[in-house]
Image (cartoon, rainbow, N blue to C red):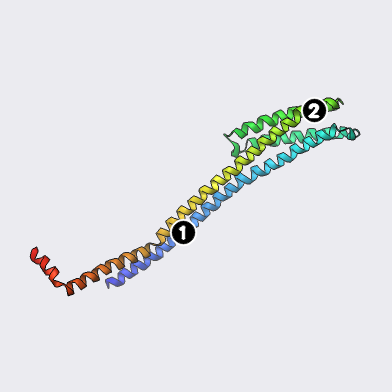
């Protein structure tokens, strides 16, 4: 009767443990899904914005080069409004990127904001010279000032992109470590029936050994009783 109750308790405990393992696994998977979703959002959006800004800045530089090109003398007036519009759009985009949570409290925030403002001012200087048809001075400004500023801004954007990638890599490593720890915990918890069976086998083995010793070597136990 007692063995039947013990067996019933063990079956209930096994079912309960399996159910608990399933619930914990489901909760952990949902948590990891949310965390990886947040990681994807925090990594993909800044990278895409940085790429878009790079294309916008390249457009500004291309227009600046065409505006002072002697072969485009008949079309230079139509290029300047396009350049001004592209520069304004790039500045707004750069300031938006600098305010992203990913770059908050980092050197990239101030770097992007400062250099993008400087670049926009240099573009305005270039446009003033070009509108005044001072193409030689505008071209010299582009070579000596505007292009180097553009290169510094590109380096700042590359550093920001490296920061995003490194941050994502660090978070992935931490999530992987959490997964390994949780997997080890689940494995240990799910293996309790095997552990209980091992303990039971050891106990039964000791009882059997003691029983055989009592049957085949009764003098050992008798001597202990006399000594007591």
Q: Measured along the vertical axis of the image, is residue 68 above or below residue 24?
A: above
Q: How many marks?
A: 2
**What kind of element bears circle 1?**
helix
Q: Residues within 10 Å of mark 1 (few under 14, many from 20)?
A: few
- Indicate which label's residue lies in the foreground, 1 or 2: 2
Q: Is residue 63 visible?
A: yes
Q: Is residue 96 visible in the rendered structure shown here?
A: no
Left or right: 3 as drawn, with respect to 115: left
User: Residue beneath label 1, please?
Assistant: 23
Whether 87 is drawn above or below 195: the answer is above
Q: Is residue 182 above or below residue 227?
A: above
At 64% from the left and 35% from the top, the residue drawn is: 98
Q: Relative to 75, is 195 on the left or the right?
A: left
Quarter of the picture containing the C terminus is: bottom left
Q: Is residue 182 left or right of residue 127?
A: left
From the viewer's perspective, tell me whether residue 224 is left or right of residue 3: left
Q: Position of residue 12 (x, y in %)?
A: 37, 66
- For residue 18, which quarter of the picture? bottom left
Residue at the image point whose x is 85% and y is 27% from the top: 135
Q: Which residue is mark 2?
A: 126
Comes first in the chain, label 1 or label 2: 1
What label does residue 164 carry, if any?
none
Measured Cα–Cα span from mark 1 to mark 2: 65 Å
């Amino acid at each position: 009767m007692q063995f039947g109750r013990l067996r019933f308790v063990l079956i209930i405990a096994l079912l309960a443990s399996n159910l608990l393992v399933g619930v914990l696994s489901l909760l952990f998977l949902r948590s990891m899904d949310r965390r990886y979703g947040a990681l994807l959002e925090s990594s993909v959006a800044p990278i895409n914005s940085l790429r878009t800004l790079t294309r916008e800045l390249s457009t500004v530089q291309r227009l600046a080069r065409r505006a002072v090109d002697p072969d485009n003398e008949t079309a230079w007036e139509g290029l300047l409004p396009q350049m001004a519009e592209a520069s304004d759009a790039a500045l707004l985009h750069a300031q938006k990127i600098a305010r992203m949570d990913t770059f908050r409290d980092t050197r990239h925030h101030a770097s992007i904001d400062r250099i993008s403002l400087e670049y926009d001012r240099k573009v305005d200087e270039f446009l003033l010279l070009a509108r005044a048809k001072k193409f030689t001075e505008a071209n010299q400004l582009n070579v000596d000032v505007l292009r180097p500023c553009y290169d510094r801004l590109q380096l700042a954007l590359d550093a920001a992109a490296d920061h995003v990638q490194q941050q994502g890599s660090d978070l992935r490593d931490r999530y992987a470590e959490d997964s390994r720890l949780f997997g080890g915990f689940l494995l240990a918890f799910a293996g309790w029936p095997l552990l209980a069976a091992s303990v039971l086998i050891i106990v039964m083995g000791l009882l059997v050994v003691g029983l055989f010793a009592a049957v085949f070597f009764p003098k050992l136990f008798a001597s202990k009783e006399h000594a007591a």
